[in-house]
Image (cartoon, helix red, strand yellow):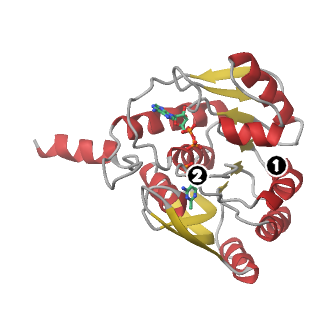
């Protein structure tokens, strides 16, 4: 079985972070492993508190996995501090996994900062150049590129600017713009659009985590980047369409809709 490792924060509410990543890996047929960088006390409404995990423990988790188990793809989410960015980058440089999908998580849907401002420069300098693909949303791409993004032309320009920072490809997610949620890929050669249909729902907690983990799962299975993104886009679209109205804020997506649906059909 192919494997994927998430290096990210824990979401007690279960919809984003490590929990979303492991559910996504499982739903997409790869064996999931995790390195926890921070623990968030979080639900669908808010992040109440955050404890960063000690740097040595982050290092030990990464080494424990890589020293023993084949890692077919790495997905990176919440990194929280510049110290965490640096140790993760250092260890990934050492083990050089074939695939690194970097979701440059910065702020939760409720507005809580999940990456300290002082860590943004370290993320740009140390992590972006290691990535097979980065998956920023519009606000994250604005911070990383230093430009405002309102139109399709802005999206194209931002992709090119982010590509200059060193990743092999940039997938800029259009979910935060008005209109259809279309995502744009730039791989230094050409643009590819992955189009979606907007679902009118507030239950979008963990959509970014889920998309990036699904891309990592596809790449772990040996799919080409475009194929992996297309199947991840199909997966997240279904997960949002059947999202769950749990909690009082932004509910989670439905990671196992297809499996539950198949099981129900077979029962009939
Ligand atoms: N309401 C929606 N309906 C359908 N797809 C959506 C919706 N909102 C976001 N998406 C898609 O979900 C994925 C995650 O995007 P986004 O919500 O922008 O990320 P993030 O969680 O990092 O802010 C993207 O493919 C985006 O186009
Ligand atoms: C621990 C953790 N990591 C990431 C996110 C971002 O979630 P989203 O995918 O909705 O941007 C989150 N809310 N909590």
* Residue 164 position in % (x across, y down): 89, 36
**200 relative to 180, above or below:** below
* Kind of element beneath mark 2: loop
Q: Which residue is mark 1?
A: 128
Q: Is residue 101 left or right of residue 256?
A: right
**77 relative to 158, above or below:** below
- Answer yes or no: disc 2 within 8 Å of ligand 2: no
Cα separation between marks 2 and 1: 23 Å
Nearest to N terminus: mark 2 or mark 1: 2
* Residue 107 position in % (x across, y down): 63, 52
Q: Nearer the viewer, residue 120 or 264?
A: 120
Q: Which mark is residue 17?
A: none
Q: Which mark is residue 111?
A: 2
Q: Is residue 234 left or right of residue 245?
A: right
* Residue 174 position in % (x across, y down): 61, 29
**258 relative to 234, above or below:** below
The residue lying at 38 percent from left, 49 percent from top is 251
Q: Nearer the viewer, residue 67 or 151?
A: 151
């Amino acid at each position: 079985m192919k494997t994927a490792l998430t290096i990210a924060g824990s979401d007690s509410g279960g919809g984003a972070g490590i929990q979303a990543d492991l559910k996504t890996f499982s739903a997409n047929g790869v064996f999931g492993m995790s390195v926890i960088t921070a623990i968030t006390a979080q639900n669908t409404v808010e992040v109440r508190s955050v404890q960063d995990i000690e740097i040595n423990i982050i290092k030990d988790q990464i080494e424990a996995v890589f020293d023993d188990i084949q890692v077919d793809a790495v997905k990176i989410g919440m990194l929280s501090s510049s110290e965490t960015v640096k140790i993760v980058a250092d260890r990934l440089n050492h083990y050089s996994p074939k695939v690194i999908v970097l979701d440059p998580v910065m702020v939760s849907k409720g507005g809580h900062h999940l990456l300290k401002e002082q860590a943004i420069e370290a993320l740009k300098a140390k992590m972006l150049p290691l990535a097979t693909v980065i998956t920023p949303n519009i606000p994250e791409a604005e911070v990383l590129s230093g430009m405002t993004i309102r139109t399709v032309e802005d999206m194209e320009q931002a992709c090119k600017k982010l590509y200059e920072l060193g990743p092999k490809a940039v997938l800029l997610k259009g979910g935060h713009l008005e209109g259809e949620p279309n995502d744009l890929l730039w791989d230094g050669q050409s643009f590819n659009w992955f189009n979606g249909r907007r679902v009118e729902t507030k239950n979008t907690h963990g959509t970014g985590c889920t998309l990036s983990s699904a891309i990592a799962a596809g790449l772990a299975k040996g799919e080409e980047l475009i194929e992996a993104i297309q199947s991840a886009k199909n997966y997240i679209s279904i997960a949002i369409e059947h999202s769950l109205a749990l909690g009082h804020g932004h509910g989670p997506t439905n990671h196992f809709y297809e499996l539950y649906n198949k099981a129900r059909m077979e029962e009939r």
